[in-house]
């Protein structure tokens, strides 16, 4: 056995002690204890993991910020030793509480992560210690920030060596600073933790909320579960649900505590499920109420088109409703059959910035959901989800109805402004 490795382990164990089933450590006169913040799956409603957090206390009883403690340490070796001490302490306190089938999330500095992964004897010894304590490596999640990418090519080798132990990797604070998906593709983390600033920004802007949902979808395509930090209230929960986030963490669900929670449903999440069911029902009812005049107007327009009226006259009823953007007619192949008809209030002030997209020309829309769904159900009105229209770069929903006219299939499409989540 490597003597340096054994000396390191002896020094770590000399710094920790057990008292009444809980472990603590000492470092340069400071007392270190473990606290654990629960991480929830919204559908399961109970903790599926915990993040281990170190708490430092001075001899006077005053709490010391962990960042200050690490910043005051001189030398990479000393920083690594304290980092290892905290993680060993968390493992002991986690295992001692015998909560089954939960992950333990452990933070590790990117430089220390890369260096430790390249010290093969120490890495093997650490894995041995953890498994002897009764914690399988597949229940450990190591959290690293995107700073790890600054370690150059060595980080990829470190990632593979760490993953070879059987642990999971989480990329922390994604969405803050200069985050980009190249880093996700290179690291291939099993879990990506969205920065806690995202909910604040998304709640203040429907546009950012839509971007957040697309970000989550792309992270899923990368093969990662998505964890949202900073959950504080129902609005945050609703935002996470709308974005299809997998895991949740925040003071609104549970603060860091020395003791792990019993494996039972969180009353806050249970209450939220009742809330969102009521909210979704009201939302559907309100959406149906808002869209009903547009639905009726499209049905009427098709009847008038089948009676031989021109598109502009047939769509007058639809275009007179506040929030109507335009109407256009497609053939059975998705080709435009003429000009796009706008309300008078819009046609008098077109947005010239998007003029290249506004002329229909020989445009073909056969791949658009509103066309494909309409021709697949002739005679039945279809309504899309909100999406960004090419015409003026506006959020809209499109109502479409396929019908027969003079033995030819036609599809009437009608856009409704949805820039604020409902017709404006």
Image (spheres, rainbow, N blue to C red):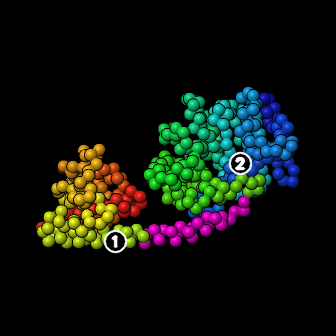
Q: Who's the residue at 76% across and 56% down the image?
A: 259
Magenta span contains residue 276: yes
Residue occupied by mark 1 = 292
Q: Residues within 10 Å of mark 1 (few under 14, many from 20)?
A: few
Q: Please give the residue where the numbered disc 2 appears in the rendered image.
A: 52
Our reading of the magenta stretch's main secondary structure is helix
Q: Element at badge 1?
A: helix
Which of 186/58 is in front? 58
What numbered label is drawn on residue 191? none
**Residue 234: percent from the left, percent from the top?**
58, 62
Residue 357 coordinates in the image, percent (x, y): 26, 47
**Of pointers 1 and 2, the one earlier in the residue sequence:** 2
Labelled pair 1, 2 in contact (Cβ < 8 Å): no
Q: Which residues are magenta?
A: 261-285
Q: Nearer the viewer, residue 33 or 206?
A: 206
Q: Residue at x 61, y 64 (%)?
A: 269
Residue 384 shows in the view: no
Q: Quadrant of the N terminus?
A: top right
281 sits to left or right of 364: right
Q: Residue furthest top?
A: 75
Considering the numbered disc 2 on the image, is that residue within a helix, a strand or a loop? Answer: strand
Q: Where in the figure is residue 17, as x and y percent of width and height? A: 85, 45
């Amino acid at each position: 056995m490597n003597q340096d490795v054994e000396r390191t382990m002896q020094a770590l164990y000399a710094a920790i002690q057990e008292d009444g089933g809980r472990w603590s450590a000492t470092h340069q006169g400071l007392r270190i204890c473990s606290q654990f913040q629960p991480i929830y799956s919204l559908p399961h409603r109970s903790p599926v993991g915990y993040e281990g957090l170190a708490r430092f206390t001075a001899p006077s009883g005053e709490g010391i910020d962990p960042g200050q403690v690490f910043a005051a340490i001189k030398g990479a070796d000393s920083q690594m030793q304290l980092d290892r001490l905290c993680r060993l302490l968390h493992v002991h306190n986690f295992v001692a509480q015998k909560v089954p089938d939960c992950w333990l999330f452990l933070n590790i500095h990117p430089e220390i992560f890369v260096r430790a992964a390249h010290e093969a004897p120490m890495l093997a010894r650490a894995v041995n210690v953890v498994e002897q304590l009764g914690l399988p490596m597949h229940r450990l999640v190591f959290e690293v920030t995107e700073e790890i990418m600054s370690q150059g090519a060595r980080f990829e080798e470190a990632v593979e060596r760490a993953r070879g132990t059987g642990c999971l990797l989480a990329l922390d604070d994604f969405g803050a600073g200069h985050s980009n998906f190249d880093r996700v593709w290179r690291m291939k983390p099993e879990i990506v933790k969205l920065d806690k600033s995202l909910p604040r920004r998304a709640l203040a802007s429907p546009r950012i909320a839509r971007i957040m949902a697309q970000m989550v979808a792309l992270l899923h395509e990368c093969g990662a579960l998505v964890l949202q930090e900073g959950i504080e209230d129902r609005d945050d929960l609703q935002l996470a649900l709308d974005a299809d986030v997998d895991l949740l963490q925040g003071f609104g669900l549970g603060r860091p505590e020395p003791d792990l929670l019993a494996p039972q449903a969180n009353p806050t999440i249970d209450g939220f499920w009742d809330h969102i069911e009521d909210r979704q029902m009201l939302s559907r009812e309100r959406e149906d109420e808002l869209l009903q005049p547009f639905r009726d107007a499209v049905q009427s327009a098709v009847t008038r088109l089948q009676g031989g009226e021109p598109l502009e006259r047939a769509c007058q009823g639809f275009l007179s409703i506040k929030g109507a953007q335009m109407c256009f007619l497609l053939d059975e192949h998705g080709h435009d059959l003429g000009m796009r008809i706008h309300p008078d209030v819009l046609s008098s002030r077109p947005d010239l910035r998007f003029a290249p997209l506004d002329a229909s020309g020989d445009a073909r829309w056969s791949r658009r959901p509103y066309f494909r769904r309409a021709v697949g159900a002739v005679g039945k009105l279809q309504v899309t989800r909100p999406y960004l229209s090419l015409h003026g770069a506006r959020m809209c929903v499109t109502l479409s109805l396929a019908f027969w006219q003079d033995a030819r299939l036609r599809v009437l499409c009608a856009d409704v402004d949805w820039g604020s989540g409902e017709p404006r």
